[in-house]
Image (tube, rainbow, N blue to C red):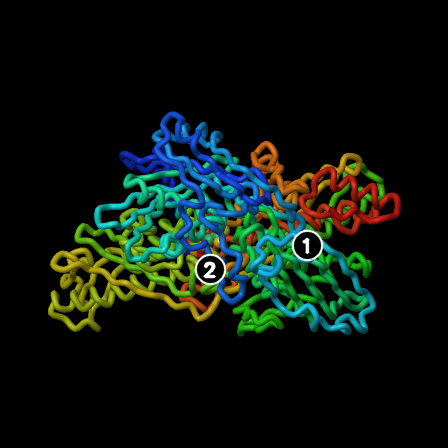
Amino acid sequence: MTVSILGTRVIRTEDPRFLTTGGVYTDDMRLPGACHVHFVRSAVAHARILSVDVSAALEAPGVIAAFTGADLADLPLAAPPMPGMINAQMGQPLLARDVVRYVGEPVAVVVTEGRYQGEDAGDLVDVDYDVLPAVVDMAEAESSQTVLFPAAGGNVAASFGDRSALAADLFDGCDVVVSRTIVNQRVAPAPMETRAAAASWDEDRKLTAWIPNQGAQGTRGALAGMLGIDPATLRVITPDVGGAFGAKFGADPEHAVVCWVARQLGRPARWAESRNENLVGMTHGRAQRQTVTIGGSRDGKVAAYRIEILQDSGAYPRFGAFLPFLTILMAPGPYAFPRAEAVATSVVTNTTPVGAYRGAGRPEATAAVERAIDLFAAEAGLDPAEVRRKNLLPAFSEPHTTAFGAVYDSGDYVTALDKALAAAGYEDLRREQAKRRADGDLVQLGIGLSCYVEITGPGAEEGGSRENATVEVHPDGSATILTGTSPHGQGHVTVWAMLASEELGIPVDKIDVKWGDTDLIPEGGGTGGSRSLQQGGAAVRQASRDLLDVARQRAADELEANPADLVFDTGSSTFAVAGDPDAAVPLARLAEQERLFVRAVFAAPGPTFPFGAHVAVAEVDTETGKAVLRRVVTVDDAGTVINPLLAEGQRHGGIAQGAAQALLEEVVYDADGNPLTSSFADYAIVTATEVPTFELTDMETPTTYNPLGAKGIGEAGTIGSTPAVQNAIVDAVAHLGVRHIDMPASPRRVWEALRAASVGGSAPAD
Ligand code: MCN
């Protein structure tokens, strides 16, 4: 009997290369004769450009050329996504033309023979700015006299729902009603590999662009749009990618400029940004201000919930302007609230554009509702675990449609919560907390909970719900898979090989996986929204099975047998006539005369909804305000898990990133729109010292939406952990009168909240 490889901890086959010779990233690509592009970026947040003088830069050593917005004036503006939903008048020129709208906006480029010459020459570009008032606070953007795009008629990029239609009687009959404005702060994706591009045009005017991205096909479309060229004349290649976290989907104006420069100068061009550029130039994430109101009975049953969202889109609406759509879709989370309302407005401000960042809209929904539940529990004087249990949807295996139109495929939220509480030893933790409170310890203990459900593989918004895969078996017994997904740390090479190996019996280490070359794989949805396994992996399985059908026919011809009489033995990867093992032919031999390959497309009937529960334990020093995360215990149910090692890796990374938002990370601007966090000295990116070892509990509730039974796991950890950690910190000082602390819970914020509570007020909102 052959033992299934699925569900086993196969070690990542990607790693030997990364751990020995290292990856080959865009900046490592050899491109003989390439010139280097250096971006001159705006030093002011909002200004009219009076002039850009590149003459001194042109005299500097190594300078080949310099270009300004005027040189690219005939190129289309980079259009906001989601036409019809987001104000189309807010497009971005590839290089600023008349106005700059954020610090870091590309204004000019200097092209040099050597990379470092560009840094020096860039300083010689003289930009004359007529500085305008900057809109930095999203709450001021809506009513501000300063309008970023006069043609757009205001600073609103998008509206979701009708604010004037909010029900006046939503909370009627509630014994307890709490309302609070909370901040889901702006964070930086900060992948290890910053943005980069290399571009080369051949004699037939065909462009090849090497770009670190999350889907070469989507990047091709975005680049073609910005360059005003036919996508068929463009080949995008994805070298190794050092992390992306949602921020490398599609293409940025800088990528298009590098391609344009290469065409203009008739020689290859390349660019790799510095960390400083990355922190101000790459899209940021989150950036919502949420007003939550929750009401219900004194015994803890919630009757109504409302969330009003203000989304900061940054200077040019990108995916960030659309985030509230997903936040609203997931607003009630796993709860059975009888009444719920949600509205949102996305505004533009003079800050770096906001885009997708791990979870993209769903962590914001979870953070809001999980804070709201805790506020409600505190007001009613109830245990937050009990309030959650009372309001969670009961287990269901048939699709459940929410008030906001999400169709949850399957779920068992109460079991997830109970498992997490049991694994954490919840009762013991509460006892320990009670003791420290009674003793008046300086260091208090906080226990934070969060229950979540999220959407994965959400459809066209993040790459489409269809995915293709081609599987080919070679005469030497090896196989190749072509996939439309685009791994950048998720381990698709290992898992796609496991899926094909399971069907074909070819060992995992003899299966090669290719992606990220639009000439080789013209179609694909890429990797985002934790869609890859449930759609791309399902396509690999389908292609493998279809390939066996083709091979069976060939084997039947060869063995002069009826196809139905053949048995495929995965152990030996061989077809044999049933009852006559001597009449056999190996799969590999069937590829000798004619290539043996099949392309399959898997179309998912809909997105899937992974869920879970997190328990965080934090200690807070009540004198200094310093919070330390002691434990994170999680249940993350992603349906059937194909490789537990990889799924756990995704959970670990996700939990750390989510905890980082609660504890440390925040992009900060001053009142004039100057970024104050443009290096890792100021942007407190999480490290291993700030997080404990995570305690993971398994739970698998398979979905019927794909033959693997799998839901996504790539973002779950981030979604669950942020509110659990935030709630733990608030809980540690709740007995001292603190009800809320905005993220990140820096010692200063915690200390201020404690001080405000001790003088009878509430924490200052900042
Ligand atoms: N997996 C599994 N069983 C499941 C679900 C997933 O074995 N039930 C495995 C998959 O085979 C895959 C991995 O877990 O190897 C993640 O799969 P999936 O949940 O389908 O997510 P994607 O591969 O589509 O990854 C996208 C997701 C997103 S949206 C972000 S953002 C993110 C993330 O993955 N960015 C990452 N994880 C990241 N990890 C790294 N190292 N770097 C990033 O930039």
**Residue pointed to by mark 1:** 144
Q: Is residue 279 visible?
A: no
Residue 401 vertical placement versus 664 (above, below): below
Front-most of residues 742 and 594: 742
Whole-percent x and y of residue 495?
Answer: 38, 53
Circles 2 and 1: CB atoms closer than 8 Å: no
Q: Is residue 179 visible?
A: yes
Front-most of residues 119 and 618: 119
Whole-percent x and y of residue 605?
Answer: 44, 71
Residue at screen point 43% across, 38% down = 109
Quarter of the rendering occupied by the N terminus: bottom left
**Residue pointed to by mark 2:** 462
Front-most of residues 356 and 588: 356
Mark 2 vs ligand 1: CB below 8 Å: yes
- 7 sits to left or right of 733: left
Q: Residue furthest right?
A: 759
Q: What element carries label 1?
A: loop
Res 502 → quadrant: bottom left
